[in-house]
Structure formats: C-alpha cells, structure tokens
Image (cartoon, rainbow, N blue to C red):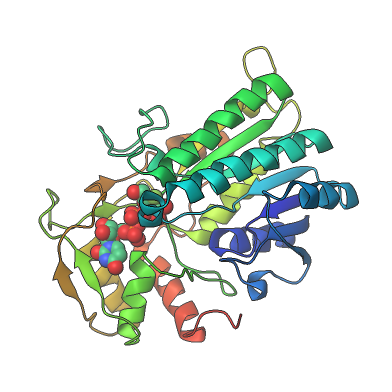
C-alpha cells in the first residue's frame, strides 16, 4: 500500500519508514526537517519537505500521490520545552494535527496510526500501566498527545476514520542505518553513550526514589520492535477490520501501549552500557528532574493480543549495544 509518514526523517519515523519499505510498501515522507534529517530517509522512500500543518501543501501532496494510510510520527516531543512553551505544543501537536486530519478527510483517507506516548498517563496510580488507566498528563506534551487521541475517537464516529494510537514507553536503540539524535538530547541512553565518548557530562537525576536502587525505573523498547508494531497497527486499520470497529461495525479508535513490560533502573542502564561499551560510565549525581515519575512500566499484553506483536529484542544489553554501534559510526550524528 502507499503510506504517508509524517516525521519520517525523525528517529522513530525513519526506522518505521525502513520497515515499511522493506515490507514492499510505497512511502511518502512529509517532514519539515526542523528536527529530522534528510540522510535518515532510506532510498526507496520519497521525501517531501514541509509540514503536516501546512494545509495547501498537504492538499497538493495527497492530490499528487493519493495514499491508503498515514503514519503520524511528527510532533514536538520535549517535556521540558512543552512546559516552558505550551503554545508551541498546542499549535503544532493539536492545531497542526487537526489540519492533518482535515486534509485526510478531504482526500478520503480513513486509516491512521498515531505516535502517542506514555506521558498521557501522567503519574500512574497502579503498575504496570494498562490502557484503561486514567489519562492524567502532567505536562503539555502529554496533554497535547491526549488531545489528539481524543480527536481520533470523535473522528472515528463522525467521519469513519480508523486509527491506532501507539503509546510508546522509552524507545531506545538503533537500526543499522538510523539512530537517535535530538537537539537538545534529553534521553538517558544517548546521553550515557556520549559521556563514554567524552562528548558531554552525564548526570543521574535523583538517587532517592522509592525504588530498589533509588533511581527511576523505565520500560525500554527497541526502536525496531516499535517499528514492526507500526506495520501491524496499519494492518489493523483496514476497512472492516474488527480491531478498529465498534460493536455496530462502524470505525473506531484503538489505543495500545508499546513497551516490553519490564523495567530497568537508571543504574541498570549504566551497567548495561558498561557491558556494551567496555568502558566505565563517567557520571555525577544530581537532584531529581522535575516531572519524572519514579516508575513507568507498560502492561503490553493488549498489543500482543490485538496485533500479534512480540518484542524480538527485549534485552536491555542488546538495545544499548545497538545504540552504541550507531553512535560509534555517527559520533557527530547525521551529516545534515
Ligand atoms: N535521566 C538521567 N540523566 C539524563 C537523562 C535521563 O538520569 O541525562 C533519567 C531520567 O531522570 C529518567 C530516566 O533517566 O529517570 C529516563 O529518562 P529519559 O529522558 O530517557 O526518558 P523519560 O522516561 O523521561 O521519557 C519518556 C519518553 C517521553 C515521555 C516520558 C513520560 O521518552 O516521550 O517518558 O514521562 F514523555
């Protein structure tokens, strides 16, 4: 099928595009390259430079190359930035998102898979987190993702849009071709690896949490496992597919957690990185980072049941080793 991937030059988007192209799909990437990288788009996919929030551009792209489905990966995604500048997050993640939905409605596209986040849950009240847990985001990033999920639910009933929101936990690792580069980089694993290379200092944010070793616990999932889940989720949006149908057979919106279902502490990540790199990890200890819940672990049973998906690379050491291989090949990130 022909798939439009917004944000297909970013981290998760580019690895998902690799998987789509490898599976024989035709891919159009829509990315304004504000945070994505031209070099991350695999040969075989076509890159259109621009934003999903640009209605005339979207109309032109969809008219020139009608698509069967959309993978909506593009978004602003920094928690701290979202607190400082919520307007940006509402404008792009919600306002731009609705522009995308309107463009799809106009073009008659009724299949969408959305990059959502564990941040929609806020501070979980029970663990592991199930999809039916209360949605109570504690920052604008999570709130804007929740808003878009809400739009998808209402668009399903009113306009027949079938969708799957994939709530990512901590995405990590790299494919052979693409890896994680954010600016600024806030995520633990790339920061650990840069510390090994002497490119930056690493601080462990808080060692006084109520966890066995005092550091926060997260559910790390390999980006290639995540990418495979996107392809399976796209299948679930096929016309009449019961997984995106309500009791009356009409279109509905589905939300699924994507995690391994197991947690690792920050100290355990450092230990895995020592094994992967063969080097001690230079680091200091700092205060807690505001807004970090002590534990975020997915109940990932529903994705397994509904999509028939299994993480193939759940091993933390392997996840970190893949990120390390990529980091060594790309010490300065992408050429552009
Ligand atoms: N950490 C450090 N030092 C660093 C970076 C991170 O100690 O330099 C710690 C954090 O405090 C946290 C853990 O490592 O305890 C993981 O932090 P990340 O920034 O890698 O990931 P988060 O768990 O904060 O972020 C994830 C997703 C976000 C989502 C958020 C919800 O990447 O998209 O969970 O809380 F919003």
Q: Quadrant of residue 99?
A: top right
The residue located at (63%, 71%) in the rendering is 40
> Does any portion of residue 265 appear in the rendered image?
no
The residue located at (61%, 23%) in the rendering is 154
Across and down, in percent, residue 153 comes to: 58, 26
Across and down, in percent, residue 63 comes to: 88, 47
Is the residue 191 above or below the residue 80 in the image?
A: below
Q: Nearer the viewer, residue 280 or 112?
A: 112
| View quadrant of ligand 1 | bottom left
Quadrant for the C terminus, please: bottom right
Q: Nearer the viewer, residue 35 or 267?
A: 35
> Does any portion of residue 147 appear in the rendered image?
yes
Q: How many marks?
A: 0
Is the residue 39 above or below the residue 82 in the image?
A: below
Across and down, in percent, residue 294 comes to: 21, 48
The residue located at (46%, 72%) in the rendering is 322
């Amino acid at each position: 099928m022909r798939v439009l991937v917004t944000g297909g030059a970013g981290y998760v988007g580019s690895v998902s595009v690799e998987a789509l192209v490898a599976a024989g799909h035709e891919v159009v990437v829509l990315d304004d390259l504000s945070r994505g990288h031209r070099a991350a788009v695999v040969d075989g996919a076509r890159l259109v430079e621009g934003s999903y929030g640009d209605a005339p551009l979207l109309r032109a792209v969809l008219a020139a190359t009608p698509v069967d489905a959309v993978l909506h990966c593009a978004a602003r995604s920094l928690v701290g930035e979202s607190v400082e500048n919520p307007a940006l997050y509402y404008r792009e993640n919600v306002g731009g998102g609705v522009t995308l939905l309107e463009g799809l409605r106009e073009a008659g596209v009724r299949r969408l898979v959305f990059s959502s986040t564990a941040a929609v849950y806020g501070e979980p009240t029970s663990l592991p987190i199930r999809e039916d847990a209360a949605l109570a985001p504690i920052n604008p990033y999570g709130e804007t993702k929740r808003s878009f999920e809400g739009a998808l639910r209402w668009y399903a009933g009113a306009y027949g849009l079938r969708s799957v929101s994939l709530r990512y936990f901590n995405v990590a690792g790299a494919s052979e071709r693409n890896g994680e580069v954010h600016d600024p980089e806030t995520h633990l694993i790339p920061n650990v690896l840069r510390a090994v290379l002497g490119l930056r200092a690493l601080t462990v944010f808080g060692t006084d949490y109520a966890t066995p070793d005092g550091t926060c616990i997260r559910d790390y999932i390999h980006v290639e496992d995540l990418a495979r889940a996107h392809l399976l989720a796209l299948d679930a949006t096929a016309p009449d597919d019961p997984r995106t149908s309500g009791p009356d057979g009409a279109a509905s919106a589905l939300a699924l957690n994507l995690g391994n279902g197991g947690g690792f502490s920050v100290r355990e990540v450092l230990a895995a990185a020592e094994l992967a790199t063969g080097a001690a990890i230079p680091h200091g200890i700092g205060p807690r980072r505001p807004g970090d819940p002590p534990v975020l672990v997915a109940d990932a049973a529903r994705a397994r049941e509904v999509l028939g998906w299994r993480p193939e690379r759940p091993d933390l050491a392997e996840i970190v080793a893949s990120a390390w291989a990529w980091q060594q090949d790309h010490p300065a990130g992408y050429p552009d």
